[in-house]
Amino acid sequence: MSDRYEPKHYQIDMYGNGCDFEVSVDHGISVPPLMVRFLDLPVGRLLFTLASPIAADILDIGLAVQVADKLCPRGKRTKHQPYGYWARRIDVKLSVRFPEIWGQSSNRGRLEQLLSFLTDDDWNFDFVRRSDGGRPQESSVQQSLLPAGLPKRPAVTLFSGGVDSTYGLHLLRRSRHDVIFPLTVTNNGRISGLRDRVLNAMMANRQSDPNIRPVTTSMQVTRRDGSIPGGVKLEDSARGRAVQFIFAGAALAINCGGNALYVSENGYGAIGLPMTSDHFGSRATKAMHPKTLAMTADLVSMVSGRMFSVQNPGFGLTKGEMIRELVADPLGRNALEQTATCDRKVYRGLLQGCGVCTSCLLRHAGFKATSVMDPIKYDVPPSLDSNGPYNGGVALGYQNWVLRENPQYPESRGSIGGRIPPDSKRARIRSGARRLPFNASSPHS
């Protein structure tokens, strides 16, 4: 039987109607198109009262990419294709306010190249003019989060509640910005709670930080009748999510009169150095990769008509160096103790971690390098000591063992350093493997 590679082909139509989008998905198979409604009213609050139409378009495109990415499952793994038919072809027809700007071959090409780099997919956009007046914030006076008039020196930073974004906010606190907007984009209530705990710890004395104004937004996908769609297979690799985050930040920055978006990611995490043999291309997240940030800045500059940058002050640092700087400041130390990072959704927002995902390993290595106690409790202690509880190298050895046991990854044998855990621990590890992200389709795991 032929196992010739044929990328899955999807066609997405998204038409704006006020605060909503109506989304039609054609899977290219003999089923009716899936009709869903995209409710982005919380996102609309980012536009405030002085809404920039181009910022609204940037926001909508980021949301469209996230929705399209979720509704277009990648191909399944097969015996001859252990990594699966990863790449897809996604055609998106989207209503925007300035189709003459986005439809220019140079600008459309910049967008499609950015998405291809992030997701390894073939993206094709067709922009049409939006027929309605957009969100209410674009046409009428609404309650604004901003004071009267735009701040002279605004700063928008992406904030997740992890060590890296906390370090980035710590740097901005010491800057001379009039207003700082830590932006959190999530549908997970635990993330919102985590963000609040970290911010409250960092702003223990609010009189000293009157200019920090947190902003949270989320999205919801429902059917036309408002019900939550059931039985719909969603793609969980979530490579398009980075576009939603970064574009939302860029839209907010432009709307506030800023010319930069601030992010914070340590150099190792930003580059995404591979830890397994299948950790290549977009199978490693490239959300904060220097190329991603540069391509985004170039695109936003071209469509907005002004110079725009996406700055990552943490790129030249390790996570350990970030931790050292945070603990040197009392408020930074307080905030650090509330941070949490794990790739598994079940742990997000809690002071717990799986102990074996990339985020847990990098966090543990950072704390280990500083001799600062990590408050996180891990399912599998990620000991990197030669005299650790699992005979050393447990985290990397654990990953190697799981990959060897999984026939879907035959090419990964011997790809990771570290010893296999001793037999006495295998029963526990085998049980744990079924709960950890290696058995999900997320390539980051």
Image (cartoon, rainbow, N blue to C red):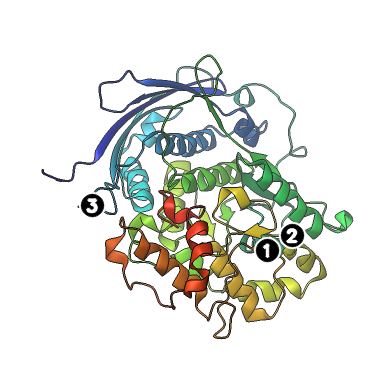
Report x, y in % for residue 181. Answer: 69, 49
Instruction: For marks 2 and 1, give the one nearer the viewer.
Output: 1
Q: What element carries label 1?
A: strand
Q: How crowded is mark 3: few (under 14 residues within 10 Å), some or many (20 or more)?
A: some
Q: Marks 2 and 3: CB-CB under 8 Å?
A: no
Q: Residues within 10 Å of mark 1 (few under 14, many from 20)?
A: few
Which of 78/251 is in front? Answer: 78
Tell me, yes or no, if residue 121 can be seen here: yes
Residue denoted by label 3:
81
Q: Which residue is drawn at 75% across and 64% down?
A: 337
Which of 120/256 is in front? Answer: 120
Q: What residue type is labelled 1?
A: Lys
Q: Marks 3 and 1: CB-CB under 8 Å?
A: no
Report x, y in % for residue 350. Answer: 69, 53
Q: Going by the image, does 40 lie left or right of 58?
A: right
> How far apart are the two marked residues, 3 and 1, measured between alpha carbons?
37 Å
Residue denoted by label 2:
338
Residue closest to the far top:
225
Q: Residues within 10 Å of mark 2 (few under 14, many from 20)?
A: many
Tell me, yes or no, if residue 273 can be seen here: no
Q: Residue at x 55, y 77 (%)?
A: 390
Q: What residue type is labelled 3?
A: Gln
Q: Going by the image, does 395 lie left or right of 368?
A: left
Q: Marks 2 and 1: CB-CB under 8 Å?
A: no
Image quadrant for the C terminus?
bottom left
Instruction: For marks 2 and 3, give the one nearer the viewer.
Output: 3
Residue denoted by label 1:
377
Q: What element carries label 3?
A: loop
